[in-house]
Image: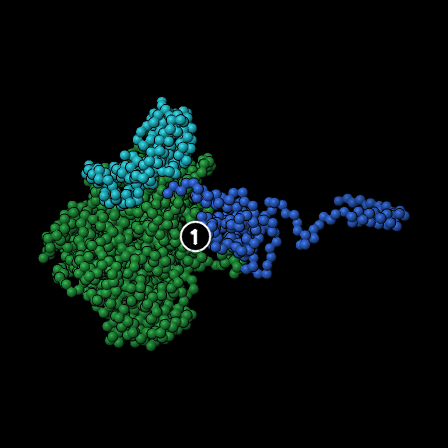
Chain colours: A green, B blue, C cyan
Amino acid sequence: MATITIDGQSYEADPSANLLQAALTLGFDLPYFCWHPALGSVGACRQCAVRQYRDEEDTTGQIVMACMVPVADGLRCSIVEPEAAEFRAEVIEWLMSNHPHDCPVCDEGGECHLQDMTVMTGHCKRRFRFPKRTFRNQYLGPFINHEMNRCIQCYRCVRFYGDYAGGSDLVAMAAHNHVYFGRHEEGILENEFSGNLVEICPTGVFTDKTLKHHYSRKWDMVSSPSVCSHCAVGCNTIASTRYGSVRRILNRYHHDINGYFLCDRGRFGYTFTDAADRLRRPLLHPDRERDVETVAEPAEAMKRIREIFSEATGVAGIGSPRASLESNYALRNLVGSGRFSSGLPRIEHDATTALLEAMRNAPDGPGSLRDAERADAVLILGEDPNNTAPRLALALRQSVRNEPIRADAGSRIPRWHDRAIRDFVQDRKGPLFIAWPASTRLDDLAAGTHRAAPDEIARLGFAVAHAIDPQSPAVTDLDDSASDLASRIARALKEADRPMVVSGTALRSPAIIAAAAATVHALRRTGSGGSSFLAVAPEANTIGDAMLEGAPLETLEQQLESGEVDTLVILENDIYRRLPAPATDRIISKARRIIALDSIATATTNRADVVLPAGSFAESDGTFVNHEGRAQRFFQPLPPAGDVLEAWRWIGRIAAETGTSKQNEWDRLDRVLTALARDCPELAPARDAAPDAAFRANGQRFPRAPRRFSGRTSILSHLSVHEPKPPEDSDSPLSFTMEGHSGQPPAALVSHYWSPGWNSSQALNKFQSEVAGPARGGDPGARLIPGNGPNERPSTAIPAPVPDDDQTLLAVPCYEVFGSDELSARAPAVAERIPKPYVALAPTDAEHHGLDSGDSLNLLIGELRVSAPVRLDPKLPPGLCGIPAGMPGWSVPHLPARASVVT
Amino acid sequence: MATKVVERKPLNLAERSYLPQIVGGLKITFRNMWKPPVTLEYPEQRPNIPDRYRGVPTLVKDPNGREKCVACQLCEFVCPPRAIRIDPGEIPEDSEHAHVEKAPREFKIDMLRCIYCGLCEEVCPEEAIFLQDTFSVNGLSRAELVFNKKKLYQLGGTLPDSHYKWDKKRDAAEKGGDEH
Amino acid sequence: MNLRAETMEHIDATIPRYPHKRSAVMPLLHAVQRDQGYISNEAIAWVAGKLGLEPVNVYEVVTFYPFFRQAPIGRRHIRLCRTLSCALCGGFGIAEVLEEAFECRMGETAPDGSATLEWAECLASCDKGPVLMLDDDLHENLTEEGVRELARTIRAENAEGSDSSMTGNNS
């Protein structure tokens, strides 16, 4: 630590930071625009001016930009010095000279960094009396609204979009006072991280278009800490609501996971909670084959369930990777672990089990996104992160700079000095290798790619392990280009300080995961200390579901066949997305009675006898276990309305009603978690993911509503002049009102970022132990999988080479960031971005079958016929075809599989 | 405490006849009978309300018939009894006021809660909400006294506008600038 | 792209001079503008393809420099100095003469396409003001009569050559 003097007071500061960061960490209010903790400094906006003094004798000093001054021992500066303060006020005055002052209609108003900084510097009178320059705005797609007149030219948008996220369609154009940030021509912003512009932009140039459709001011929204439910990364979010519906999702900082950024699927997928097909009342289907449904009262539905249970010979439960840990556990407890299914077909179940095994087996446990961001050599084995775990792709995009920076002079440039670092790195990229059948959006960064069938990808992985450490078994019959690539990868990983292997279940291949694990262990054996294994899973709670060790769906089918079981309880799972329709129909028709719980109407709920409306993430409390085995609690921003209840609460009631177990006391989240901890020791730390419901600060709860929440007495005034009693929350230490503890809650309970003078999300600086560091009091969540040290367990055998097959194609799943996720695809804005159905085909194969791009291709996969237009992917190797997974309306489950072309 | 007894003077003849007093009284009566009246025949006659009077808060339109409120929600924010509820909405693309971006979809004021403080009028950046001269509100139910947008515009009517700032904005965008 | 053979030759010779292809973007744009008179969207896409860039990256450069033109201009390009010395010597009077002669305002192109009038900042000939640049030629010590004569010549030339190509004003 270095000792610096600010305004005559001595402080300790981190010498790797710059003065602006240090000042903000120490609690000073110093205005800034172009600096961003994740983007670094460029010293462009001249807003963070302070006076720096040479030594104690120096009383004149000079004005410097704090963001460009490295913290050093003995640094002396003044923030309050009048000339520096006047300088800052004048900079704001220039920036404001063209600003339209249209705060009343601006979506940013009330949470605007420019407003905050203007007030902070004291500028209040406009002296510029000439016409303001104006621009024409562009249509930028369903996510982002564009209002260029508000721009203050801080350049943060293009620095994020281009430099950080790798997007190429948002640029700065023109010069002088008519700099324009936009696209070459109107059109959808292509990059899947465009939503971050909403928070990156210090004013209202880029705003959330989905919020605009049901706008509410920040101070009016009741928010709660949530966890994104659209992939397994588990980005922390803040879900904000007003008048009973979710209005927007904001980023909630987590040092080890999402940092400052979310992907567009996570940010804009929330509107599925308000979609027309949401289930809000219990439904009864008197005849499953006919499409007749009646809305029932909860008591009526419960009565029916009691009848069903009393008639049943055996009840089995189908869990779900998108339901919370508590709901899955409650179901397992209801039906008994012998009759509990993870809700996955065998092909996915085996891959997930292998992934969990590899995570437990990894030397230091599974790696985090922060590890990925700091890695200096990466091998992606059988994953397409941009589409399966988008936020991970953003982290990996940063990792390729690490190796060039580490080289020679780069290591002497402070990491926050963005311009200098980028000038130094230029186009050099560190080693990133991608093994995936088709092209990916990280290909522009890759030092090498391997396009091959899943088994060939696994073989490459084993070959890399062998090349790193000859102790690992050798791969026979590897072709020259693959073995050459394997040795290049092995060399890069061995030379790296922090090598990382990314692998997951995308190709449903346990061999690929085993190969990744073997590589990590080979690295560990040969002495690389920092090696890590990053697991990618498909859904929000895939890992949590797998840790409950349910059986695959096929086992359940056998139990139904044998007559051991005749009734199914299906938890938040659309089996039609998991198995081909004929197989699902067999399961459904063999079950005499089906009880389904879900938040959305699906093909499965349409065929259940009783459907109970479960809460989405917005109406539920629960825990998701993310891709790194971190249990994270999400809290409901909305008190459940109508008959909607958390799925675990419904299951508790079913248990109480039918007397199957002693779950009747399970009316509180903490009780479910206590039972879970008792039954599953490995999951016991999940209790510590967030403080329990009894947690208080000074005897007070933590408010979900901000202190300036308005309209409180008028919202229901036409019903009663008395304010209604606010809903009580028995599951969390949060309250639904603005009353409660006014200080900062623990990180797991942060509902909004606000600090005096800081109304924008930049108030986040005040919630961190140091700027861009961990949250105050520690980051939320509990790691469940500690790692296994250097002991490698024997891994799966190396698969044989894929034989040449002229007759059939190998259909492999490929993924779409917008479309492959079940829930977000139901959000209207995301639905606009879902590509049309397609089958990706190599040009040589297309030629062979006499097909061209756009022609219709008919495939027979097992008993399923698939028909879709051809999309040519020159990167795809011959003999493969890629079919997007989980697309709404035409999902093709159960891949990879052999497909024959029918004409 | 000492008391003093005052002797009552005996009345003289004129006083005993009461006539001078009756005449005096009638004089005042007749004098006032021909003076203009100082009371109002309320409710047929309405009082003259001073300009700065704070009556019921109302929403106003500009002389071109554009609703001036842009649903910024500052009045909702500042309202001490939290009596205002605004549901902001978008202006359709094809409207001639599309450049204003926002207008209230619904605007409700709970007149049972309103304390006539005028902070909403003071805070309004668009000069869209005014406490005008309506001072009596009544109704038969609580629901009737929650005024909706329609009712508030009915009460507010049209007020003169010295800025037309949104027209200026549109003109500026159409004529000058347009840098891209 | 319909470029002349010598422009193509020049472009092909220019690109290898730079360690990174993208560095040649400015010389290429100059060459295209010399050839075509302005830089069209088609030209932007062509330059981008030539240098392995996204069109929008070239567009950024084109919009940054006011001297890259995105619309065709008149046959001749007149840039009249408006900086202090020339203004004191009657530069704005000259502007009025030009506007009258070409029937258009400063910043616009004459209706017959003979010339485009633009303001320029100091042309570094302050002792001989007012001055203007006619394409690449400096005209000094302007008088109103001289400018009228110049305008007449330009318009006459234009009327004669109107059947030939409009492009190539700067070559």
Res C18 seen here: no
Instruction: Name above or below for residue A107 compared with residue A665.
Output: above
The residue sitting at 50% across, 58% down in the picture is A716
The residue sitting at 29% across, 74% down in the picture is A589
- Mark 1, chain letter? B
* Screen quadrant of the N terminus of chain C: top left
Is residue A788 found left or right of B59 in the rendered image?
A: left
Is residue C167 found left or right of B105 in the rendered image?
A: left
Specify the farthest residue to the top.
Answer: C127
- Under tag 1, what secondary structure? loop
Q: Position of residue A359 (x, y in %)?
A: 22, 56
The residue sitting at 44% across, 42% down in the picture is B175
Instruction: Name above or below for residue A326 compared with residue A114.
Output: below
The residue sitting at 40% across, 26% down in the picture is C145
* Screen quadrant of the C terminus of chain C: top left
Is residue A109 found left or right of C14 in the rendered image?
A: right
Q: Position of residue A779 (x, y in %)?
A: 31, 50
Q: Position of residue C57 (x, y in %)?
A: 28, 43
How many labels were placed on the picture? 1
Residue type at numbered disc 1? Glu
To which residue does mark 1 refer?
B93
